[in-house]
């Protein structure tokens, strides 16, 4: 988290940073162009931003894409699906996958590249259209119904 904050320092951006419960905010050096929050609802935050930087979790990544936002992923652990999500975003042209311990310089380069090249936003928008066309609740309900029906047959 500190490397991300250091990367943001001095950039001509206004950053809104959420730490979550696992990061002690009092231990972080926050640059002048950043606001630090422990939590903000996606519905309030995502319509106001141009880029998301995160660990590649499904919830935040899908929410970002559904708002046509490119994503820079720094996975927390390589053995989790976060690495694969970052790879998929990179392959689609909708973001970057960086190592967890990327330097502030490398993170800054990725931020500048994504914000400076409209192709990332366009790729994220294409994925966003696809995501918004899906009826995730119905698909999930159908899958649950199918599992329950199979379990009754055994």
Image: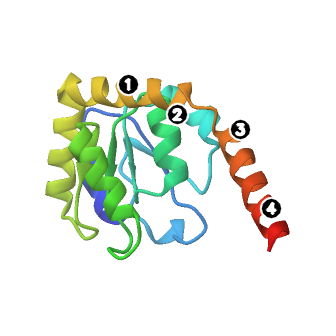
Where disc 4 sits, the SS reads helix
Q: What residue would you read off at disc 2?
A: 46
The residues tagged by marks 1 and 3 sit, at their Cα atoms, a distance apart of: 23 Å
Q: Are marks 1 and 3 in contact (CB under 8 Å)?
A: no
Image spot of residue 66 (x, y percent): 50, 32
Residue at (70% x, 40% y) in the render: 137
Give the residue at mark 3: 138
Comes first in the chain, label 1 or label 3: 1
In which quarter of the view is residue 22 placed? bottom right
Q: Of marks 4 and 1, which one's residue comes earlier in the chain?
A: 1
Residue at mark 4: 148
Q: Is residue 150 above or below residue 50?
A: below
Between circles 3 and 2, the one closer to the viewer is 3
Q: Nearer the viewer, residue 29 or 150?
A: 150
Along the polypeptide, which appears first: circle 3 or circle 4?
3
Q: Position of residue 15 (x, y in %)?
A: 40, 41
Q: Nearer the viewer, mark 4 or mark 1?
A: 4
Q: Residue furthest right?
A: 152
Q: Is residue 10 visible?
A: no
């Amino acid at each position: 988290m500190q490397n991300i904050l250091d990367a943001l320092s001095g950039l001509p951006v206004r950053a809104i940073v959420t730490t979550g419960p696992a990061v002690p905010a009092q231990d972080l050096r926050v640059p002048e162009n950043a606001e630090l929050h422990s939590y903000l609802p996606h519905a309030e935050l995502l319509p106001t931003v141009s880029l998301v930087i995160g660990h590649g979790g499904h919830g935040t990544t899908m929410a970002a894409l559904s708002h046509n936002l490119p994503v820079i992923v720094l996975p927390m652990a390589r053995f989790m699906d976060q690495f694969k999500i970052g790879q998929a975003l990179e392959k689609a042209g909708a973001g970057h996958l960086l190592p967890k311990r990327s330097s502030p310089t490398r993170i800054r380069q990725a931020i500048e590249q994504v914000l400076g090249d409209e192709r990332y936003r366009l790729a994220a928008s294409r994925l966003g259209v696809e995501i918004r066309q899906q009826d995730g609740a119905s698909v999930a309900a159908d899958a649950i119904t199918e599992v329950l029906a199979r379990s009754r047959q055994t």
